[in-house]
Structure formats: structure tokens, C-alpha cells
């Protein structure tokens, strides 16, 4: 055996010395714990299941989401509006006296619910209607009846978010359900009749 | 330390910490995950493998392919690009002049937002595109990082640990041809000159050509082809493995790993 | 001196009580070590000539490398560890081994389980999880065997009269608790027809692999080293506090390492692993300080003996720990992750640290337990040099290869020249293991022959019967 230390066979089992606690190693541990916590705060996303590196937090991930969907929808809504509605209501949404009421600032456009608004292009409007304090008595054909749901939704979303209007979007499903509730031959309504409908 | 029970309890707590953090918590958070949808779409992700591809995963596992190949793409960061979609009606000339002077790709989010504001202020219309960046992505191994959703239905998950060979998470996109996959399995050096990959000859059968050549027979280059009158035919395991490899793709944008897909213009 | 003779008698009895269990464990361990290293060499050879084993499914790289890794850990490392633990507990308790036949039966169960696992992996039945390729049946055999041996070890520990624990006690007792915990968890959740869903499998796999390869081997290796370094040098362990501190920080922080940075999992998992790896530095410092203080100035002329083995192994452990920490630093993961660097760290831990330490311990234990000297004393030094050369060549080449791979973005030829050196490393390890196995096998044969001679002598000797007619 190449163990050179010739202790007796009855040598005691190994022992361990006691010494004063070396504070420096405890200090080092605490410093590393602190640095580790800072690192975790910056890089972990705080246990969020959707945050993967390189994103540092759920807020950052949300902010970085590509908004192409909404942008594309907006572009489409604008395109359809300008070709179908803008002739009468104006590209700037201000309406034309004797032709069509304004959409900018209109309480009908900015209403919280969307079904009363969606009714207008789907069924048309006929008779007295009050818009922004002024009376209009025109006849509007059902300009949106022939449009696909998505396009009409895009148009309505567009007018609700343009020219100072700050109302929520209209989805294709909304349009679909309004269309379905209207039945076969919807009649154009005047303002009073429209107010009786749910918003 | 003399109080045996107290020490035992403390050791249990210390050891149980990592069990809680890396077994219990992931089993609850990731192990209960459900199918998700592709970003800005209602298509599901991931799609379940079917048929031969499911069996192929077992061939992959049995032969220890994960010893050399990984199925995980990493990502280092993101880069933004600002794309002009219309010069607008107010001052189109100024818009195009401005666009030619600005740096519009490889931007951070703040730079992209600043450029967007500058251009839209004079009437231009822009779109912001997001791309994932990283060494793996630059190498063409993927368009975004791999995330948990990509492995939802894998039993077992074969992430791999060493890249002796290339990453395979998008091999179904890079090499969508079944014959290529089979030739590569039979004779890797037919595809990559000095490949260290062992030929998986036991997954194939060299047999005499019958009345007419088999439709499954491999198209091999001359130096790897069998003798005249013989053909190389894949066994069922080889076909399953090829089907599995063809099913490997992770190229759809997700909420956790967003990017702007490059769509073909209509 | 009478008390010295009594002590010697007592110690000899304690050693003798361990004889059969230890032979059962070490004999199998030596066999699996040789076979595992041979398979690893076969796997390594495929890099030089991929065509070599192309026609045989059981020799393909994916199966052979997995089998080799499992044989090194389950076939060699764990049984060797258990044998050493049994003896150390018996000695520290100053009591004979309790229930000595239980470890004998369990050792045979264990080796059967390893055999079943090996056959399954080479036959294509691998579970698909790294370091956990053995099938359910094998895992059950291994689990039961381990628990049986642990029962004997803990019962022996319970026989101690000295109430205060020696530092090695904590390390080794924690190891006896931790392996069944991690092994049963991993097998129940992964090696089953319906494992946890999705990437949680990978997380649990990484947790298990880190806790087995880094934490468990460290617990046993450091515990064994902290027993033998003072014992061989005749000096006390310096100091109790550092050893305690190393133990607690190892199990508090070391158990949380192991999740790779770029993994397809939410960011909080790799972040926790990074922080844990950073804190592991204090554990490594404590182990290093204890080892250096205990060893420095020790009056031991080593000449390739067990003291050299264990000292080198501890240095390899510190290096392996530092490699683990480096691999978890976000700045370096781009270069180090998913390369040969991780494999280098694992092999450095298993072979460079643990195998060398445990072989040194076995060389100290076997002569005492058998009652006669090692048949081939020169082989001890030969094995030491072979394993040292193997460690440097294997871990060094794979480590460098990994860095090259990372720097060249995994271009195919980046690591190939360096891999050729690793084959040389495996060859040195295989040679060293043959030297180790030779000692163990010849000792076993000598003992069995002695038994046979004893039986023959007994049969031939006249019986004492009261009425004998002349």
C-alpha cells in the first residue's frame, strides 16, 4: 500500500477541527445573493409563462407584438370607406350639406354599442335624424348590405377611430349578428325608430 | 450537529426546494398547457402529428438521434424594420426624401417608433415589421426561437443536448423531400461530404430488383448506389423516421415569440 | 498494548463484516466500468470512421453513447459509492455492518437491473431521456436495490455511540436520501406511457441530470474525500465550519442548476438556474478551502496512491464546478451551450472527479476489508496515471472542442480534429479501468480460493467425537 503514514491500526477515525466562523464567506454569499436577485428581477419575467428570453417582462412582450393585423384592417377599412362612403360623407368625415351628415364627432358613430350603428349601412336610413344637434332628412341606401362582414367591420372600425373619434372597434362577428337579427328585407329607419333599437 | 431529526428535516426542506421549483411548478405551469393559436390568426398551434410521423418519433428516440441533434432554436434579440406603405397625399416628395435618408432596418423598438413618428407626421403611411435575431436564426435553422408550445404533443420530447449535427427543429421546412431524408439516412456522405453521421444502413434493405424497380427505391449517387441489379429500399422504420423529420417545423409566429411573417404579395 | 490489540480486533471485525457486501458491489462496479468505457470508446471511434459499425443497429452512436453513459453512472459510480458508504458508516459508528446479507442481495438485484437496462438501450428501447434511458423494469430493480442498501447503511449509522456527526456523515446521509427521491420522481413522471405534457419533460430531465451528475456525485465524492484525506494524512479536517458550509450551499444552490439558458422554456427557469450557479461559487470555495487546508503540509509521500487519487479528484471537482458556473453565465452561453463543453464537464465530473476519488477510496478499503494486500500494487499508480492522462485528454479536448464549436457557430468541421484526441482519452481510461478491475478480480478470486481451501481443510480435519474407538 502506498499510504506512507504509519499510524497504528487502532488509529482513531478522522476528526474535524473547530474554528471561528470566517465571516468573509458569509459576506460573499450575501453579496452574490443580492446580485442574483437583481439578475432575476431583470431577466425572469417574474414566473410569467409567456415571457421567454430575450423579452424581459410581460409588458415588453406585449408592447413588441407586431400590430400588422390592426394596421392591415385599418388600411382596408380606409380603402373601402373612401370608395363606398366617402363620396357622400366626405373623405374627411365632415359630411356634405344636403348629401350626408358628418361622421366626425357624431354621437351615432361614437356610441358605446355597435349594433345600432351597424344597422345603418346594412338597412339604410330614411327620414328625420338628428346628428350633432342638426336635423337631417335624407335617404340613404343600404350601402353596406353588399359588403362582406369583415370589410364592413373594418369600415366601421375605421370611422370610429378617425377624425377625433375614439370609439372601440367593430368585429366581423358583430356585423354578422346584426345582419342575422335583421331578417330578410330590412326597412330603412328614421332617427326615432333607430333610437328604439338596442345600442 | 446533534439533533438528528432537526437536521433531517432541514435537509429535506433544502432538497425539496429544487423539487418544488423544477418539478412541481413546471408540471403545473407547463404540464397543463393547452393548444394555442398562431399570432393574428385563429389557426391552432401545434398540430398533432399523425400516422407515420408519430411512429417516426419513436424511431428517433430508439436510435438516440438526440445524442447528436437538437430540436431547439435559440434567439438573442429582436430587430424592427419600418416599411413605407404609402407616400400619402400631403407631401409625397418630402416623404420619399425622408425615407431615403433614414435607417429603416435593424432598429430597436424606440428607434422604430421614432422613425414611424417622423414619417407619419408628414403624411407617410408605414408598417413596422418585427424579426427575431440570433446566431441560430442567422444560420437558417429557424425564424424564431423554440417555445414550449412547439413540443406540446411530443412523447418523449427530444430536445437534444449537443449539436454534433445541425439543429432539426425546422428540417421539415429546409428539406421537405422524403427521398432527400432517406438518402441522408442511408448515406450521409452522399449529401454532406465529410459528415460524421453514421450511415443508418440497418434501416434499409438492399435487394435484387424484381420485375420492376420498387417505387420506394432510393435515388442514390453513383458511388453510394448498390451493385447493378440491386436497389435500396427503406424499411418501415426508415419511412416513419423520414415522415417524422418532414413534420418538424416551427415557423409560425406565436404570442410568446412574435415576428412578422413574410407573406407573398397577392 | 491490550487496548490497542482490542481496538485492532474490533476494527478488523468491523472490516470483515463488510467483506461480502463490498465485494458484491465493487466486483460488479469494476465490470461495468470496463464495459462502459469500452462502449464509450466504440462510440468515440465512430467519429473517425462512421462506416465502421453502420450495419448493426445495436452499435449505432446514439444507442452506444447512451449505454456507455448509463453504465458509467449506474453500473459503476453508484454501486462503488454505496460500498464505500457502507464501510465508512461502519467505521465511523465503530460498529459492524447491520444486516450484512441485505446489501449482498441488493447488489445482485442492482447489477441485474443494470444488465436489463443495458440490453434494452442497445436493443432500441431507450426511454429517450438523457441519463435516464433505462426502462421502467430496470428502474424498479435499481430503486429497490438502492433503498435496501440505504436501509442497511442507515441502520449501521444508527449504531453509533459518538453522537456528534462527522462532516462526511451529512454528505453521505443526504446522498442516501436524495438519490431515491430524484430517481423515483424522474421515473414516475418521465419513463411512463403518459409522461408530463410537453416541455415539462425536458425541465424535469434537466433537473434530474444535474442532481444526479453534479449534486449526487459531489455529495458522495466530497463526503468520501473529507473522510479519507484526514485519515490518510493523520491530520484533522480543517475545518468543521467550512465543511458544513460547503454541504448546505451545495444542497441549497447546487440542486437548482441545470436548466440551459437558451432552452425553450419560460425565462424564469433559466434565470433561476443562472442565479443558483452563481451562488454555487461559494460552495466550491468552501470545498476548495477545506481540501487545501487539510492537505497542505501533510506528511504523505504519495507515489500514485489513494491520497494522490483523491487530491487530484478534488481538483477536478473544483474545475468541473467552475465549468458548470461558466456554462450558466448568460454572456458565455452563446459560445458554450449545446456544444461539447457540457459533455466535457459531465465526463470531468463522473470520471475525472468521482471515479478517481472512489477508486482511491476503494484502494484504501479493500486491503483492510479483505485482510491482505492488493495483489498488484503497481497497478494503483498505473491506474492513477492512466486516469489523469485520460481526464486531461478527454475533458480538455472536449472542452476546447466545445469552445471552438461555439465560436464557429457549429460549423461541421469545427470540433472534429479535437474529437480525435478525445478517443485517446477514452483509451487511457479503459486501460486504467482494466488495471483497477485486475486488482479487484484477483482479490475476489484469492478470497474465494481461500474459502475453498478452508472448506476442504475443515472437511479433511478429524472431527471431535466423544466416543472414538481406537
Image (cartoon, coloured by chain):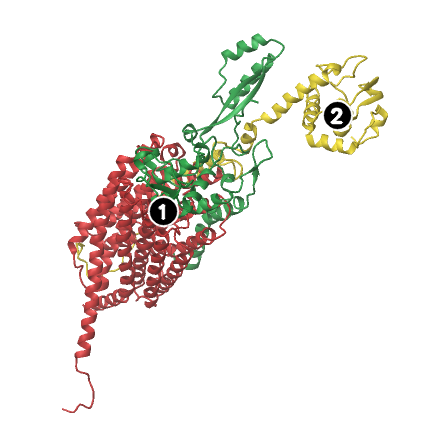
Chain colours: A yellow, B green, C red
Q: Is residue B16 depicted above or below C335 in this figure?
A: below
Q: Mark 2 points at which residue?
A: A145
Callout 2: 10 Å neighbours few (<14), some, many (20+)?
some
Q: Position of residue C90 (x, y in %)?
A: 30, 63
Q: Residue at x 78, y 24 (%)?
A: A120
Name the element at disc 2: loop
Badge 2 and badge 1 both on one subunit? no
Residue B7, located in which quarter of the rendered image? bottom left
Residue A79, located in which quarter of the rendered image? top right
Work out whether residue C269 or residue B217 is closer to the camera in this orientation and state it: B217
Q: Mark 1 points at which residue?
A: C214
User: In the picture provided, is A57 more to the left or to the right than B161?
Assistant: right
Q: Mark 2 lies on which chain?
A: A
Q: Where is residue C265 in the image (x, y as percent from the top left)?
A: 48, 39
Name the element at disc 1: helix
Quadrant containing the C terminus of chain C is bottom left
Amino acid at each position: 500500500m502506498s499510504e506512507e503514514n504509519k499510524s497504528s491500526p487502532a488509529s482513531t477515525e478522522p476528526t474535524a477541527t473547530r474554528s471561528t466562523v470566517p465571516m468573509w464567506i458569509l459576506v460573499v454569499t450575501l453579496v452574490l445573493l443580492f446580485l442574483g436577485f437583481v439578475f432575476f428581477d431583470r431577466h425572469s419575467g417574474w414566473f410569467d409563462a409567456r415571457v421567454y428570453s430575450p423579452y424581459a417582462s410581460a409588458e415588453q412582450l406585449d408592447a413588441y407584438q407586431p400590430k400588422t393585423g390592426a394596421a392591415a384592417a385599418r388600411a382596408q377599412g380606409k380603402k373601402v370607406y373612401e370608395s363606398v362612403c366617402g363620396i357622400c360623407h366626405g373623405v374627411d368625415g365632415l359630411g356634405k350639406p344636403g348629401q350626408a351628415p358628418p361622421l366626425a364627432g357624431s354621437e351615432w358613430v361614437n356610441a358605446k354599442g355597435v349594433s345600432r350603428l351597424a344597422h345603418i349601412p346594412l338597412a339604410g336610413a330614411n327620414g328625420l335624424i338628428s346628428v350633432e344637434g342638426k336635423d337631417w332628412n335624407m335617404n340613404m341606401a343600404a350601402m353596406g348590405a353588399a359588403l362582406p362582414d369583415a370589410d364592413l367591420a373594418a369600415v366601421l372600425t375605421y370611422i370610429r377611430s378617425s377624425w377625433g373619434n375614439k370609439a372601440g372597434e367593430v368585429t366581423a362577428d358583430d356585423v354578422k349578428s346584426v345582419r342575422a337579427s335583421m331578417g330578410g328585407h330590412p326597412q330603412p329607419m328614421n332617427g326615432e325608430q333607430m333610437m328604439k333599437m338596442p345600442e | 450537529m446533534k439533533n438528528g431529526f432537526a437536521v433531517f428535516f432541514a435537509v429535506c426542506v433544502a432538497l425539496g426546494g429544487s423539487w418544488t421549483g423544477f418539478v412541481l411548478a413546471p408540471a403545473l405551469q407547463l404540464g397543463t398547457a393547452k393548444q394555442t393559436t398562431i399570432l393574428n390568426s385563429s389557426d391552432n398551434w401545434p398540430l398533432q402529428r399523425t400516422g407515420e410521423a408519430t411512429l417516426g418519433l419513436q424511431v428517433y428516440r430508439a436510435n438516440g438521434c438526440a445524442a447528436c441533434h437538437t430540436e431547439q432554436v435559440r434567439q438573442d434579440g429582436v430587430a424592427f424594420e419600418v416599411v413605407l406603405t404609402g407616400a400619402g397625399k400631403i407631401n409625397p416628395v418630402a416623404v420619399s426624401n425622408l425615407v431615403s435618408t433614414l435607417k429603416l432596418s435593424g432598429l430597436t423598438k424606440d428607434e422604430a417608433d421614432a422613425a414611424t413618428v417622423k414619417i407619419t407626421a408628414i403624411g407617410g403611411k408605414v408598417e413596422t415589421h418585427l424579426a427575431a435575431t440570433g446566431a441560430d436564426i442567422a444560420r437558417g435553422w429557424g425564424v424564431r426561437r423554440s417555445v414550449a408550445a412547439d413540443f406540446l404533443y411530443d412523447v418523449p420530447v427530444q430536445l437534444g443536448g449537443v449539436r454534433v449535427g445541425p439543429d432539426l427543429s425546422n428540417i421539415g421546412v429546409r428539406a421537405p423531400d422524403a427521398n432527400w431524408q432517406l438518402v441522408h439516412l442511408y448515406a450521409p456522405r452522399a449529401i454532406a461530404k465529410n459528415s460524421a453521421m453514421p450511415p443508418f444502413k440497418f434501416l434499409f434493405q438492399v435487394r435484387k430488383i424484381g420485375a420492376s424497380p420498387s417505387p420506394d427505391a432510393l435515388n442514390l449517387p453513383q458511388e453510394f448506389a448498390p451493385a447493378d441489379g440491386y436497389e435500396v429500399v427503406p424499411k418501415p422504420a426508415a419511412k416513419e423516421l423520414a415522415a417524422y423529420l418532414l413534420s418538424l417545423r416551427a415557423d409560425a409566429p406565436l404570442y410568446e415569440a412574435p415576428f412578422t411573417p413574410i407573406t407573398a404579395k397577392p | 498494548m491490550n487496548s490497542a490489540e482490542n481496538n485492532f480486533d474490533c476494527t478488523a471485525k468491523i472490516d470483515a463484516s463488510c467483506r461480502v457486501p463490498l465485494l458484491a458491489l465493487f466486483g460488479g462496479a469494476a465490470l461495468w466500468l470496463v464495459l462502459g468505457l469500452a462502449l464509450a470508446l466504440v462510440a468515440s471511434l465512430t467519429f473517425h470512421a462512421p462506416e465502421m459499425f453502420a450495419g448493426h443497429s445495436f452499435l449505432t452512436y446514439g444507442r452506444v453513447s447512451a449505454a456507455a453513459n448509463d453504465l458509467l453512472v449506474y453500473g459503476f459510480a453508484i454501486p462503488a459509492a454505496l460500498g464505500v458508504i457502507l464501510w465508512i458508516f461502519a467505521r465511523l459508528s465503530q460498529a459492524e455492518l447491520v444486516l450484512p446479507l441485505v446489501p449482498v442481495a441488493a447488489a445482485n438485484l442492482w447489477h441485474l437491473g443494470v444488465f436489463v437496462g443495458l440490453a434494452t438501450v442497445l436493443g432500441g428501447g431507450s426511454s429517450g431521456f438523457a441519463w435516464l434511458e433505462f426502462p421502467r423494469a430496470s428502474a424498479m430493480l435499481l430503486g429497490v436495490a438502492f433503498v435496501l442498501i440505504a436501509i442497511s447503511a442507515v441502520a449501521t449509522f444508527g449504531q453509533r455511540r459518538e453522537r456528534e456527526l462527522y462532516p462526511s456523515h451529512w454528505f453521505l446521509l443526504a446522498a442516501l436520501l436524495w438519490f431515491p427521491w430524484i430517481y423515483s420522481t424522474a421515473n414516475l413522471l418521465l419513463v411512463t406511457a403518459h409522461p408530463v405534457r410537453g416541455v415539462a419533460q425536458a425541465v424535469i430531465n434537466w433537473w434530474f441530470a444535474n442532481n444526479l451528475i453534479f449534486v449526487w456525485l459531489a455529495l458522495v465524492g466530497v463526503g468520501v474525500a473529507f473522510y479519507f484525506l484526514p485519515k490518510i494524512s493523520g491530520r484533522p479536517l480543517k475545518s468543521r465550519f467550512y465543511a458544513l458550509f460547503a454541504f448546505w450551499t451545495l444542497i441549497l444552490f447546487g440542486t437548482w442548476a441545470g436548466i440551459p439558458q437558451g432552452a425553450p422554456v419560460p425565462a424564469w427557469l433559466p434565470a433561476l438556474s443562472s442565479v443558483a450557479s452563481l451562488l454555487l461559487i461559494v460552495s466550491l470555495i468552501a470545498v476548495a478551502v477545506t481540501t487545501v487546508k487539510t492537505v497542505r503540509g501533510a506528511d504523505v509521500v504519495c507515489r500514485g496512491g489513494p491520497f494522490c487519487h483523491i487530491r487530484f479528484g478534488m481538483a477536478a471537482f473544483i474545475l468541473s464546478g467552475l465549468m458548470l458556473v461558466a456554462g450558466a453565465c448568460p454572456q458565455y452561453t452563446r459560445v458554450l451551450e449545446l456544444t461539447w463543453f457540457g459533455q466535457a464537464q459531465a465526463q470531468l465530473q463522473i470520471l475525472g472527479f468521482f471515479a478517481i476519488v472512489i477508486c482511491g477510496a476503494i484502494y484504501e478499503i479493500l486491503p483492510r476489508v479483505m485482510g491482505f494486500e492488493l495483489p498488484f500494487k503497481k497497478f494503483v499508480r498505473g491506474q492513477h496515471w492512466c486516469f489523469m492522462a485520460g481526464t486531461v485528454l478527454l475533458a480538455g479536448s472536449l472542452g476546447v472542442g466545445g469552445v471552438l464549436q461555439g465560436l464557429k457557430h457549429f460549423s461541421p468541421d469545427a470540433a472534429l480534429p479535437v474529437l480525435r484526441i478525445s478517443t485517446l482519452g477514452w483509451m487511457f481510461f479503459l486501460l486504467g479501468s482494466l488495471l483497477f478491475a485486475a486488482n479487484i478480480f484477483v482479490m475476489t478470486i484469492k478470497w474465494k480460493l481461500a474459502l475453498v481451501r478452508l472448506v476442504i481443510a475443515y472437511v479433511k480435519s478429524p472431527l471431535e467425537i466423544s466416543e472414538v474407538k481406537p
